[in-house]
Amino acid sequence: MEVTRRGVLGGSAVLGGVVTAALVGAAPAPAARPGSAAGDALLTVRPGDPQYADLVRGVNQRWVGRPGQVVVATSTADVVRAVQQAARSGRRLSVRSGGHCFENFVSDPAVEVLVDLAGLDQIGFDPARRAFVVGAGARLEEVNRRLFTGWGVALPAGSCPSVGVGGHIAGGGYGPLSRLFGLTVDHLYAVEVVVADRSGSARAVLATREADDPNRELWWAHTGGGGGNFGVVTRYWFRSPGADTSDPRRLLPRPPAELLVNTVIWPWEAMDRAAFTRLLLNYSRWYAARNRPGRVENHLYSHLITFHRSGGAVVLNTQVSGQAPDADGLLDEFLEAIGDGVGVPMQSTVRRRLPWLLGTQWSGFADRPVGRRIKGKSALHRSAFTEAQAAAIHRALVSTDYTHPGSGVLIAPYGGQVSAVTGSATASSHRDAALILLYVSEWDNEAEDATHLRFLREFYRGVYASTGGVPVRDGSTAGAYINYPDVDLRDPAWNSSGTSWQELYYGENYKRLRRVKSQWDPLRLFHHQLSVEPAR
């Protein structure tokens, strides 16, 4: 029987058109679609229209917007016109790509104009730039399919198929191939962004990583600076650094032809504190000791899913690249190290080989969220868990005054090839982290909001009690991940560390991001509760 994070979160027991533009000048418009010509009216949905109820909500049902209009964009020209109208009328604007935001940045009741990018989903190869072009509304599932079936290449992006690339890339983008190939933004060549100047005049700007590009800082800000900060991304171009060829099959990483996937579980009923904390320490120590580029262990990626014991089991899902010299041997070595001294036999439920594209749909990683209420928090760890941190995780997950199987923490590896890039080369600054953690709770009933929010907040604060309730950048922890936004980090009631949320997310890169903000969003048209502030 396969066990997935979705099964745990669902409350069930765990055991149960080619672009050919020149590189200079303004970015070209894609092939025209209905409603995208300069003289046509924007496709706009308003309250009372049949599409409205669906378009004003994303995956997270805690937030439902009420904008006066939703612009359904099908071209960059549509976005330019929508941004200009909002800027000149003084209306609050927001933008949605895939709709997976943990906070209300898109669905804030103050937002008056929502730009929906789902129609900007083109994926192709641009021979003039020798790069793959991907519309900001494309979903990861389709990006995987098109890049792989067309050219045999892939991006080291996330594992949730329904995530839109718009925000995913802007926040850095990591996934099961990142330990082999780095972050998604390590392969980002260019970005097209719709911005507005001080007069409210909007335009599309192309920014590349070329050293002599006058717009290069705008490209840099989209390599981990987070979405909704500088403008509206409409398209991304991807080409790996150093790829000196016109052959598209050699311009991005080639994924493994085959994946070895595996699931094991440890029944909670057999786990005491000693067994559970030993499991956490084994897991985190294994990755912390193997956190550099070029190691054979970088072929192995996993999720350790530790949710409340009412879910029935602790779950470990693993994939090993078929490019590894001995995939089965590497997996066996890993499982032996993780189970060493735990004292509770692991129960194997899955071990099989899948071709790569099918493997991206494997339910062990390929989370497909449904409409639920969600709160998320994140942490990056440079080193293995401390005894105190492991004990705090155990204490929260076995609490008897809170019994909800949809709350816990998912622990995944970072590092590997990610650490080959310096923290300032891109806006993604957590390059020396070995682990990335997603603390999350999902539930259905609005009346239970306070209960689940309180649990997750206290759980997180308890794990990082020695550093003011948050994972400060010290020898052990390395801050938080902006693609899992958490407004609690700016609240002194939950962050008493003296470390700002800006430092947790961006470190020293925040100063540079502020300068980019000042230059490219002088009206502060794009803002939310965790947005980059302009330099003073």
Image (cartoon, helix red, strand yellow):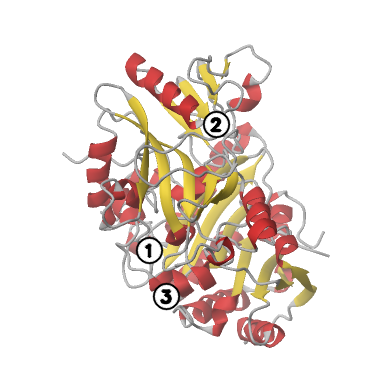
Q: Which residue is mark 3?
A: 383
Residue 504 seen in the figure: yes
Q: Which residue is mark 2?
A: 63
Give the mark toward the camera: 3 or 1: 1
Residue 528 seen in the figure: no
* Mark number, residue 430: 1
Q: Nearer the viewer, residue 106 or 248?
A: 248
Q: Residue furthest left?
A: 536
Q: Secondary structure at mark 1?
A: loop
Residue drawn where x is 52% and y is 63% of the image: 251
Considering only vertical position in the picture, is 416 above or below 325? above
Considering only vertical position in the picture, is 161 above or below 463? above
Labels 3 and 2: the sequence-earlier one = 2
**Residue 464 screen position, x and y as percent:** 40, 62
Residue drawn where x is 22% and y is 44% of the image: 515
CA gap, disc 3 and disc 2: 35 Å
Q: Secondary structure at mark 3?
A: loop
Q: Nearer the viewer, residue 457 or 510?
A: 510
> Within 10 Å of the Cα at label 1, are there few (<14), some (14-19), or many (20+) other Cα atoms?
many
Q: Quadrant of residue 153?
A: bottom right
